[in-house]
Amino acid sequence: VTLTFEDQFGDAENAKFAQLVTQFETENPNITVNVIRDNASSYYDKLVTSILGGSAPDIARVEPPKAAQYIASGYAAPVDAYIPGSERNQYFPGTVEPLVKNGKLYGVPQDVATLVLYYRTDMFQAAGIAAPPTTWDELQSDAQKLTKAPSQYGLGLFGGWGAFEFYPWLWQAGGEMLQQQGGKMVPAFNSPQGVKALQFWTDLENKYKVMPPGAATLTEDDLKGPFVAGKLAMFTSGPWIVGTLKQAGIDGKWSAAPLPRDAQQASVLGGMDLIVLNQSQHKAEAGKFLSWLMQDTVQSDWASSLKFVPIKQSMYSSPQFSSDPLNAVFLASLKVSRSRPTIAQAGDIDNYYGQAVQAALSGAASPQAALDTAAQKSQQALAQQ
């Protein structure tokens, strides 16, 4: 049997995954895994086209909101037979949520990520700040102390990735993305709590001027350079940035902490999921491959080789991962991390929400007006289903 596996791996991921595939094929000589790497922006469009055209791969690596959409649309097959309940319980609950429908599991998380606050310990020491901020008030105060004209800024938050970076702040303020109303799901992010969170961001940029200008369109790539150069004291990112920072020549000058809280602690889950497509003629073999990938030994190899954090809670206590103090920060953040919306319309809603964040940061609309517009568009998307 030959399985087709479609993905959007980076170079390092692709190379490591090829090693794992070779190992699997050696242990299972009757199964060949044909990995199709497609890093084009049209990846998901082409994937859906192949599904509708009856030529879908056996396994696809997709973002959690996409996984939820495909599961809701009937594109994915249950994998409960290959992933026992004892295994499922080891994953962080938020990573499993997008993959469950009517109690059945339709995929597995391959990677897990969460946003934390990276900060320059040397800049904190120079400013007389003893510890990273734990509340919004402390974040604002510290960012002001760390901002020095004309080109040093205390904090980097950005809208160039759409809504992804902003989700934690909505939840920290006590807001929700969606809520049930009259038996239907309706937008809730334009609540007073949602407006408070977006106003906080816009004030940090425009009122207190502690963020680099142009935050509406900045991305992580625009901020990691200034952070390494000592021109930016704090920014938010995930485990994926650790390798870059460790190679930047600033050892001993930076660390990480959970995001500061407002009404509550919260962060957002990132990562990727693996699903078996429903039209696959080799579901048993695909399920066997997923089960093999989820073994602790394989996951330890994958995570440690790529400097990722483990997808299983039980793995954080092993010496391999507990010896790195950063993993304790990621674990604390993962325990309060939440999944983005996982309903069928999640992609559209996420897009509208990201546009609202950008509009407010750019000054094109007030936080309330921007969120109201996004809520109206989201409601229309919900009504069309």
Image (cartoon, rainbow, N blue to C red):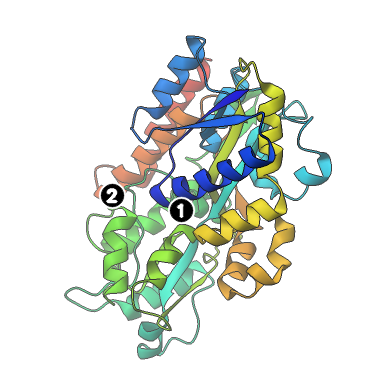
Give neighbour class at mark 1: few <14, some 14-19, many 20+ (Cα, 10 Å). Answer: some
Q: CA distance from mark 1 to mark 2?
A: 17 Å
Q: Is residue 32 above or below residue 141?
A: above
Q: Are marks 1 and 2 in contact (CB under 8 Å)?
A: no
Residue type, mark 2 in image: Ala
Residue under pointer 1: 196
What is the secondary structure assignment of the residue under circle 1?
Answer: helix
Name the residue: 58% across, 38% down: 273
Asked whether residue 311 is in view, the answer is no
Q: Is residue 171 left or right of residue 10?
A: right
Q: Nearer the viewer, residue 123 or 261?
A: 123
Could you tell me which residue is drawn at 45 percent across and 45 percent down? 14
Q: Position of residue 107 (x, y in %)?
A: 65, 33
How would you rate the neighbour count of disc 2 (Cα within 10 Å): few for under 14, some for 14-19, many for 20 or more? many
Q: Position of residue 240 (x, y in %)?
A: 46, 58
**Which quadrant: the N terminus?**
top right
